[in-house]
Image: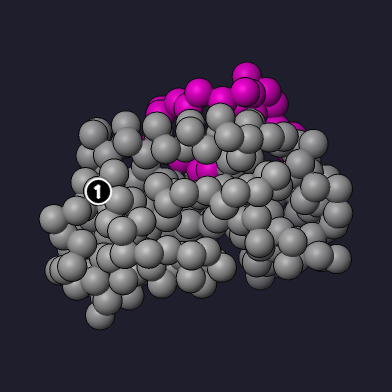
Amino acid sequence: MTLQASQLAYARGDRLLFSGVSLEVGPGEALRVTGRNGAGKTSLLRVLCGLTLPLDGEVSWRGTAIVQDRESLHRDLIYIGHGQAIKDEFSALENVQIGAVLAGLSCTRRLALEALNQLGLRERADLPARVLSQGQRRRVALARLALPAPESDETSLLVLDEPFVALDQESVGVLAALLEARLAQGAVLVYTTHQAQTLSAKCTHELNLGVATAAEAV
């Protein structure tokens, strides 16, 4: 397996959000995380990305505990949180290019425009992000998924917090197609959602933080 976690526990202050969470997700597979608000879905994603330390348990990426080698994990990682991390003073195009550079990717103006075009934002590419709607800003953040995947034999890890939120039905379909293409290339996908949107994957694991402590394949 590529992404593994064993007996994860996490607390916020004195409140235990979850415990005993174990999972395994391999290339081409998806993990769909659900649960009520406040169950710890976002916290779990941050733990899996190595952005937050768990109270207990361990996360491994490609056989190595991430506490020992966060650099390798972050090199393979695309993390898009619930907050878009979009800079208001920059254009949609500039935000895509800056996000790519920060992730260590090469991104020309042409590639950024093509990515925005796939998300239906070509005509708004040069507008400052502050004038965009919430849904448009969300699509700017998600445009990174439309950039060409690095030519590498290594598996990429996509961790997305509520990726379908604030999107219209057409954009949901576009995003689903992008994610399915990445899965077909062998990516590992972990995402939270309150929506019923399904994705075609080699295997889809389900984890309900309010009910289960181990991911189940469906």
Q: Please, is residue 70 above or below residue 193 in the view?
A: below
- The quadrant the C terminus occupies is top right
Give the residue at the far top of this rendering.
218
Is 83 covered by the magenta stretch? no
Give the residue at mark 1.
Answer: 117
Q: How many marks?
A: 1
Q: Is residue 217 visible?
A: yes
Q: In the image, what residue type sits under mark 1?
A: Asn
Residue 65, quarter of picture: bottom right
Is 60 on the left-hand or right-hand side of 180?
Answer: right
Magenta stretch in the rendered image: 191-218
Query: Residue 128, percent across and down?
Result: 19, 72
- The quadrant the N terminus occupies is top right
Is 199 covered by the magenta stretch? yes
Q: Nearer the viewer, residue 89 or 149?
A: 149
- Provide the secondary structure element on which disc 1 rests: helix
Q: Residue drawn at (31%, 58%), measured in percent from left and top?
A: 110
Q: Residue drawn at (24%, 71%), measured in percent from left and top?
A: 91
Principal secondary structure, stretch drawn in magenta: loop
Q: Is residue 135 visible?
A: no
Residue 47, quarter of picture: bottom right
Is 82 on the left-hand or right-hand side of 38?
Answer: left
Q: Nearer the viewer, residue 52 or 15?
A: 52
Query: Residue 98, percent across and down?
Result: 41, 72
Q: Please, is residue 88 above or below residue 184 in the view?
A: below
Query: Residue 196, percent across and down?
Result: 41, 28
Q: Residue drawn at (26%, 65%), measured in percent from left and top?
A: 92
Give the residue at the far bottom of this rendering.
89
